[in-house]
Amino acid sequence: MKWEGERESTNVEDRRGGGGGFGGLGGRSVGIGTLVIALVGGAIFGVDPGTILALLSGGGGAVPVQQRQPAGPPANDEQSVFVRKTLGSTEDAWAQLFSGQGAQYQPARLVLFEGATPTACGTGRSATGPFYCPADRQVYIDLSFFRLMEQRFRVEGEFAQAYVIAHEVGHHVQNLLGISDQVHRAQQAMSETEGNRLSVQLELQADCFAGIWAHQRSQVIEPGDVEAALAAATAIGDDALQRQSQGTVVPDSFTHGSSAQRVRWFRRGLESGSVEQCNTFEARQL
């Protein structure tokens, strides 16, 4: 991935290195599709299960905890520079797409943290993997997740890491478009199985939106990059994770989609570059 020439985003906050203690934050998330329970060692693209239960029951009020000190700008280590440039590339891609529709893109902020950090959706923890909080419009990433991708899922390469960031930014786009809120409201009147299906559709659309980002930034793609992203999508499919953790696959419990589905929708966004082609909610086949 030729990311060195990309613009660095200024919308990154660094809470690593002891500067990210807890603050009295609370709130209710509307992006239920992004707040899902993981199947292998925590959540993948989700948040803490206890937080989810509290949010779903309306108990997202502030918790009196220690105030954190203001965080500084991100460090200039290679990985944080890569994150800033990747986020910048998503901003440029979506700004162009929104502008084409006569709208202005409002970028998400990205927070780097270690261990745990406060969010408007509750406490974010490293074990839960990267996630997007619609309530504060921020993406949260502990960079140790990228090592987990390599060690546990055998997924390597910078483009695979960029795909993770682009997926979470895809949830931000859904939030801006009001899709996340519509899904949340619909889920309130559904059974768990029906609600899970909506979560899958939301997640697959975020994969498709990540593909659109890749389509827009095709100049940074090198041989093997797309394959790395597809390997990441395959590794974190619900069926792959369930098979690894419990030996059986239960489709009704899927919240993100199967490996094949994730690959298919990322490819659709990559090949079409069209938001209209990412309408997972009316697709005949997921």
Image (cartoon, grey):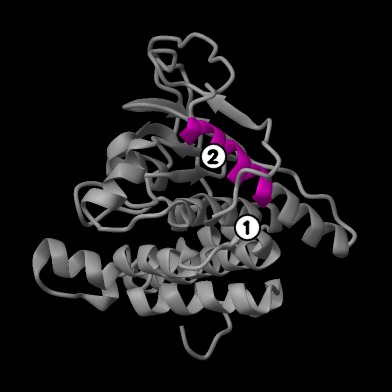
155 or 66, nearer to the observer: 155
Assess whether residue 68 is covered by the magenta stretch: no
Residue at the farthest left position: 247
Nearer to me, 31 or 2: 2
Residue position for label 1:
220
Is any part of residue 190 visible from this angle?
no
Looking at numbered disc 1 in the image, what kind of residue is underneath it? Val
Asked whether 39 or 53 is in front, the reply is 39
Residue beneath the point at 51% across and 23% down: 14
Q: Is residue 15 visible?
A: yes
CB under 8 Å between discs 2 and 1: no
Location of residue 121 in the rendering, given as x and y in whole percent from the top left corner? 46, 37
- Which residue was labeled with disc 2? 82
Residue drawn at (44%, 38%), measured in percent from left and top?
141
Q: Secondary structure at mark 2?
A: helix
Give the answer, above or below, for where 138 lies relative to 149: above
- Position of 182 relative to 117 (above/below): below
- Horizontal and vertical percent for residue 102? 90, 60
Identify the residue shown where x is 41% and y is 64%. Answer: 228
Q: Quadrant of residue 199?
A: bottom left
- Magenta segment, which residues? 78-90
Q: Position of residue 138 (x, y in %)?
A: 57, 38
